[in-house]
Amino acid sequence: MKRVKAQKSANMLSALKMQLVSKYSNVVVQLIVTMVLARLLTPEEYGTVAVVTVFTSFFSILADVGVSTAIIQYKDLEYEDFNALFFFCMILGLGLAAFFCLLSLPISMIYNEGELIPLCCLASLSVLFASMNMVPNGVLMCERRFSAISVRLVVASLVSGVVAIALAAAGAGCYSLVWQSVTSSAVILAWNCAATHVNLGNRHFVAPLKKIWRFSIYQAGFSTINYFARNLDNLLVGAIMGSAQLGQYDKAYKLMGYPLNYLTGIFSDVLQPYLSEYQDNKKKLYESWLSICKVLALVGMFVTAVFICFPREIILVMYGDQWLPAVPVLAALGLSVGVQMVNTTSGAIFQSAGRTDQLFKSGVICTCVTIVAILIGVSTGSIALLGLCVSLAYFVHLYMTALLLVKGVLGVRVSSFLKSFLPSIAAAIAAIGVTYFVGWLTSGLTTVLNVVIRALVCCLIYGFVMRLTGEWKSLSVFQEMKKIGVEDND
């Protein structure tokens, strides 16, 4: 059976709008669920589940083996190939889930927490579902069926959120958070299979696997080492500083991650399905990506300013006063949000250019940088200093991306790329400086009035610098997106 051709009439802007609606509907759901759960569960319980989540994420990455992105990149795969790969992913998922269960015993011994054994065994279901999700998800992305993807995201969050809150209210503790993850992955799998009609009918997976192997193995390698870069801090904090400290750090880290997931993620999800059409036109690929990066820098640097100026207010509103020790961690991690928003999209460009080998190389170097930063941070015994070290590592990551992707793959000077973000950086610095000064002047006012004045000043100063430098014009990229996808029909 031949594969259905991608719906070329759907341009990138249309896909972006669908992702925007679903992501922000989802963020509302997630925030409400998180705010409720943060008041039903303790930092220690969150810390315990954070350990489980680290290993669940690792096994889920192993379960991917780059199949999903390879399906997007290789346009000559047919539906029989998808069915064969789906069968392969199921076998792989079953094996990894079983291994995760066996590994739960040494994990519990390392962290001296017996409850980790049943929690890890329960979480292994997420690994199985994640593995089986790779093929149908890749098909949906390749065919640019973003409406189905968008609705699926919100439905999965709603269902899993209700399950988690009900279990937490019933006194399930840590198990409510693990069941939230399992339920979400199960709903997504059921939705994906119904939408794509992928099945287990073809067991001959060797041929299609050989076809995509070189691309997917480097992607899988990058994902694996990137996992360590993103999760080593949680592993070490939990093992050395304890569950309570890990809970505080993990909460701050997740708050920092919201803009990355729900702003950058909107772009990252649609980039490869569209920009892979330009894999033989590096100039067009770079220009399209840079225009998106400038918008992400504009938004990301403003978010950085907000995190640095208002960490206490954010923590109190989101989680309550029992999480106040996370305030300095959030401010330290928030320093790198703008840089991360730009750099997070680079993976899709490596993929679109067909250079997952360079993506893997970038991942190895950046992981080494992150490991050094985390070891330095943990050695201080302060989760706030750890957050600062991690943020500084992300700045180095952006420079390495400029060397390997911008110069090495796309053939553009590093300095030309980095200079593009100077206006946004200047606006953030100005907004932070003036906001702190105004906060000092208005310190005698009521707390609410002080916050309102500082928030207005932060927004006005950032907007003024954007207007002064003309950087606001980068928003015109959304008009250009209307052409991407439609022009493929010409």
Image: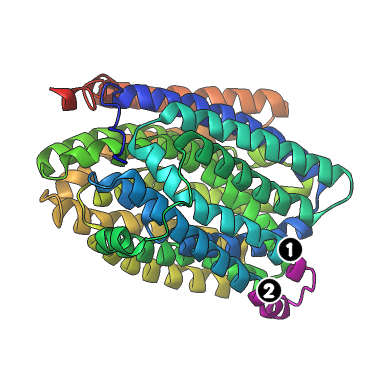
Q: Residues within 10 Å of mark 2 (few under 14, many from 20)?
A: many
Residue 208, image quadrant: bottom left
Asked whether, in this view, residue 8 is left or right of residue 124, the answer is left
- Lower sequence index among marks 1 and 2: 2
Q: Which residue is drawn at 47% across and 67% down?
A: 228
Q: Is residue 85 magenta?
A: no
Q: Quadrant of the N terminus?
A: top left
Q: Which amino acid does label 1 sit on?
A: Leu
Tag 1–tag 2 contact (CB < 8 Å): yes
Give left or right: position of 27 versus 141. right
Q: Is mark 1 on a helix, strand or loop?
A: helix
Q: Name the residue under label 2.
A: 104
Marks 1 and 2 sit apart, C-alpha to C-alpha, by 8 Å
Q: Looking at the picture, does residue 465 appear above or below residue 256?
A: above
The residue labelled by disc 1 is 119
Main structural element of the magenta stretch: helix, strand or loop?
Answer: helix
Q: In which quarter of the image is residue 368?
A: bottom left
Query: Splitting the image into 4 quarters, where does residue 265 fall?
Result: top left
The residue that appears at 76% across and 41% down in the rendered structure is 163
Q: Which of 337 and 57 is in front in this view?
A: 57
The amino acid at mark 2 is: Ser
Instruction: Tell me where the magenta segment starts and ends, as one range.
Output: 102-119
